[in-house]
Amino acid sequence: MPGGRRFGNSMVSFISKLSSGYWNVMDPANGFTAISSKALRYLPLDKIAVDFSLKATCLFRLNTIRAVVHDMPMLSEYGSEKSNLRISRVLFQFPFKYLNCLSKRIFYNYFLRDFNIGSLELMMAFILMGFGLIFGGIHWIVSFETRQPATAGTVFLAGLPIILGFQSLLAFLHYDLANIPQKSITSMEA
């Protein structure tokens, strides 16, 4: 596989993991996909994309029904065939599709269907980082316009919430990593 394609594939894989919540799937953009008939019955098939983001939207929808997903290893062989993927076309479509899946997944899993420690960590991350950035930005502009350096207390009051907010965001990501579905749909119906 060419280096540029390998790098692009790893970036798409990471973004797909983030948007779907399946951090355990190594290469969601390339691989074998098999879905049980029971899981398939729960999926809203009309809401799954039929373009290059098919696997991403399918994984997102599988996460909303808390389906267990496993990697199925396969050997990838790239010959002289040409890909019909146009980077210039998908470069502007993919980010919005992945962001849409991510925001829906976060809302569904952490606010609508459940409210847990991950929800609190994410809220605190946004509140603290938002306060620190706004407060720091305002005082930075004032310092720039007045040519007066900000006091150590002002810098501390802007920096500490950003640091604590970032730590809270990391804690949320840790919680999200541990929140991968473990119980299959078929075992829940018994």
Image (cartoon, rainbow, N blue to C red):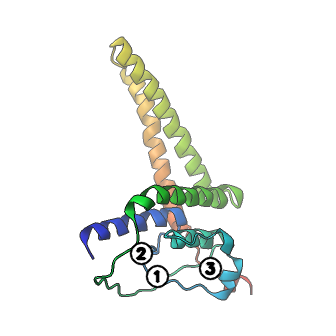
Marks 3/1 in contact by CB < 8 Å: the verdict is: no
Mark 2 touches mark 1? (CB < 8 Å): yes
Q: Residue at x 27, y 66 (%)?
A: 4
Give the class, few, some or many, for how many residues have Cα within 10 Å of label 2's Cα (few <14, many ≥20).
some
Above or below: residue 8 compared with residue 156: below
Amino acid found under the numbered disc labelled 1: Asp
135 or 62: nearer the eye?
62
Look at label 3 and name its amino acid.
Lys
Identify the residue position indicated by label 3 in the image.
183
Residue at label 2? 27
Front residue (pair 60, 5): 5
Q: Position of residue 90 (x, y in %)?
A: 44, 61
Q: CA distance from mark 3 to mark 2?
A: 21 Å
Residue 49 in the image: above or below residue 168: below
Q: Earlier in the sequence, mark 2 or mark 1?
A: 2
Q: What secondary structure is found at the residue carrying circle 3?
A: loop
- In the rendered structure, which amino acid carries the disc numbered 2? Asp
Q: Residue furthest top?
A: 146
Q: Position of residue 68 (x, y in %)?
A: 58, 79
Residue at 51%, 68% in the rendered image: 53
In depth, the one of 43 and 5 nearer the eye is: 5
Nearest to viewer (mark 3 / mark 1)? 1
Label located before the other in sequence (3 or 2): 2
Spot occupied by residue 44 in the image (x, y as percentages of width and height): 69, 72
Measured in 3D between alpha carbons, the distance from the residue under mark 3 to the one under mark 1, in whole angstroms, is: 16 Å
Q: Quadrant of residue 179?
A: bottom right
Q: For the residue labelled by badge 2, is the local secondary structure a helix, a strand or a loop?
A: loop
Above or below, comparing residue 38 to residue 49 in the picture:
below
The residue mark sitting in front, 3 or 2, is 2
Which residue is labeled 1 in the image?
71
